[in-house]
Every structure is written in structure tokens, then in C-alpha cells.
Amino acid sequence: MGFLSRIRRLVSGQTYLAGGIMVYAPVSGDIVAIEKVPDVVFAEKIVGDGIAIAPKGDQIVAPIDGTIGKIFETNHAFSIESPQGLELFVHFGVGTVELRGKGFKRLAEEGQTVKAGDPILAFDIEYLRDQVESLLTPVVLANMEDVKYLDKAQGSVTAGKDVIFTVQL
């Protein structure tokens, strides 16, 4: 995916975005280091670098302006790509795939163009809390090979309002 993003950016003439791309919190809560997620795929940054959020609330929103790539059939995770070629993956909790969609509702569709803050998925946090190993929600950069700079935020965040990291491609 990363290689194709680079080609698309070159062909379309997309230029350096001064200050980088701001990625907003897809869910409200407290930022946690990605290394603390109890899943080796995220903790060891196999999928990419990023942060996790200990969630509050009941919705996952678009973290950037872009196009939704894949929404998992179980509605617990999705990918999104910005017009500049930044590829993000948002995955609610650890063990949520085994629930086969229970506790989640799709609010957007694959291929849909969205703005940062637009609702993508809804979740029932009370139900999920008792069903899965962890509610920590990783937000990772899927095309790290394209990333020149990554600045991660800390603290509490509000979905769609607070920046969780800034990326320079």
C-alpha cells in the first residue's frame, strides 16, 4: 500500500504539507503508549507505529479527512487514507474480532469520503468491557515507510477535536 501511495502522490503532484498532517482522536479517552497494548501485533509495532486510547463514550470517528478503505465485517476496525497518502488503521480493543460484530454498529461505508470527526462506528462500551481482554484502541500508521516525522501527543483527548499525532510524509 505504501509504495502505491508514493506513486499516487508523485503522479498527482501533491506537495509537502507545511506543519504535517494532524491526526485527531478517533475516540475520546486517555492516550496510552502503543507498547502497552496487550497484543504483540500492536505492541511491537508490526502493523505500524502510533498510539492507543483507553476509550470513553460510544462512537469512533474519522481521525483525518480521507476515504474509508476497509471496515472489518465485525465492525471493530477500519482503515482510512488521507488525500496526501497517509494510511491509518483504527482497531477497537483486543479480542473484539471474536465477538463477530456484537457490541458494534457501522455508521459509514467502505469507499466513503469523510471529514475528521465524522462518525464511522458506534460501540456499546458497557457490553464490551465485560467481553474482551482490553478496550485499548490502537491508532496506527500503516505506511510507516512513507513517514519522515511523527510527533505523538499525551493526555486526555476528545474524539474529533484533539490531535493525537502529527505526521510528515
Image (cartoon, rainbow, N blue to C red):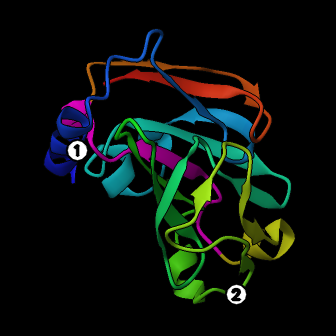
Disc with the residue nearer the chain's start (1 vs 2): 1
Callout 2 amino acid: Lys
User: Which residue is identified by label 1?
Assistant: 8
The percent coordinates of residue 16 (x first, y second) are 33, 16
Q: Height in image: 69 above or below 154? A: below
Range drawn in magenta: 132-146
Farthest residue to the front: give it: 12
Q: Height in image: 157 above or below 125? A: above
Callout 1 amino acid: Arg
Is 149 on the left or on the right of 151, as rendered? left
Q: Residue at x 66, y 46 (%)?
A: 115
Instruction: State if disc 2 and disc 1 touch (CB < 8 Å).
Output: no
Is 73 on the left or on the right of 129, as rendered? left
The percent coordinates of residue 46 (x first, y second) are 25, 50
Tell whether position 140 is magenta: yes
Farthest residue to the top: give it: 18
- The circle on residue 102 is 2
Q: How many marks?
A: 2
Tell whether position 55 is magenta: no
Calculate the distance from the C-alpha at mark 1 to the C-alpha at mark 2.
Answer: 37 Å
Q: Residue at x 56, y 83 (%)?
A: 74
Q: Quadrant of residue 112?
A: bottom right
Q: Residue at x 81, y 77 (%)?
A: 127
Q: Residue at x 13, y 46 (%)?
A: 3
Q: Secondary structure at mark 2?
A: loop
Q: Quadrant of residue 140?
A: top left
The percent coordinates of residue 138 (x first, y second) are 51, 49
Is 38 on the left or on the right of 46, as rendered? right
Q: Quadrant of residue 30?
A: top right
**Which residue is at the front of the view, 114 or 125?**
114
